Image: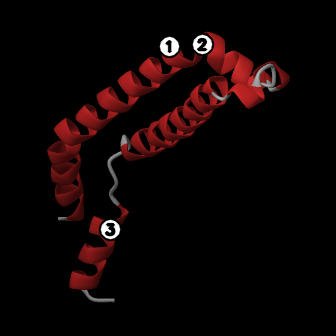
Amino acid sequence: MTSEESSRNAKKKAVNPLYPVVVLSGIAFTLTACAYGILMVRTQDPRSAGTVAASPLLVFLDKNGFLLLMVELAILTLASVAAMVTDDYWTARRDASSK
């Protein structure tokens, strides 16, 4: 393996540790938003009257869905901004360790 190849491998291995937080919070927000949207559609449909109570998830989202979405959105926003702000730091650290 040449030094150029090892340098490329070192660059590929360095990852901002906030990226997994961004991805996981984005997935959680997306799933919650979809479930909350389903709840809103089901409550507006007169044919499904009373069936919302049959699902524990929809009952939970009915009571706490908006708050949950806002908390997840705040976490996603903070993690995204932190990842962008610290990206130069992690890149510089990676470059310093590969020298």
- Asked whether the beta carbons under mark 3 and mark 1 sit within 8 Å of each other, the answer is no
Q: Is residue 37 left or right of residue 13?
A: right
Of mark 2 and mark 3, the one earlier in the sequence is: 3
Measure how far apart labels 2 and 3 are at the Cα level: 41 Å
Q: How far across and down, in percent of the image, does residue 47 sit? A: 75, 30
Q: How far across and down, in percent of the image, does residue 94 sit? A: 24, 56
User: Could you tell me the amino acid type at mark 1?
Assistant: Leu
Residue ID for mark 2:
64
Residue ID for mark 1:
67
User: Could you tell me the amino acid type at mark 3?
Assistant: Lys
- Mark 3 is surrounded, within 10 Å at the Cα level, by few (under 14), some (14 to 19) or many (20 or more) other residues, namely few
Give residue 56's quadrant in the image: top right
Measure how far apart labels 2 and 1 are at the Cα level: 6 Å
Q: Residue furthest bottom?
A: 1
- Asked whether the beta carbons under mark 2 and mark 3 sit within 8 Å of each other, the answer is no
- Mark 2 is surrounded, within 10 Å at the Cα level, by few (under 14), some (14 to 19) or many (20 or more) other residues, namely few
Residue ID for mark 3:
12
Question: Residue at point 64% right, 10% down?
Answer: 63
- Asked whether the beta carbons under mark 2 and mark 1 sit within 8 Å of each other, the answer is yes
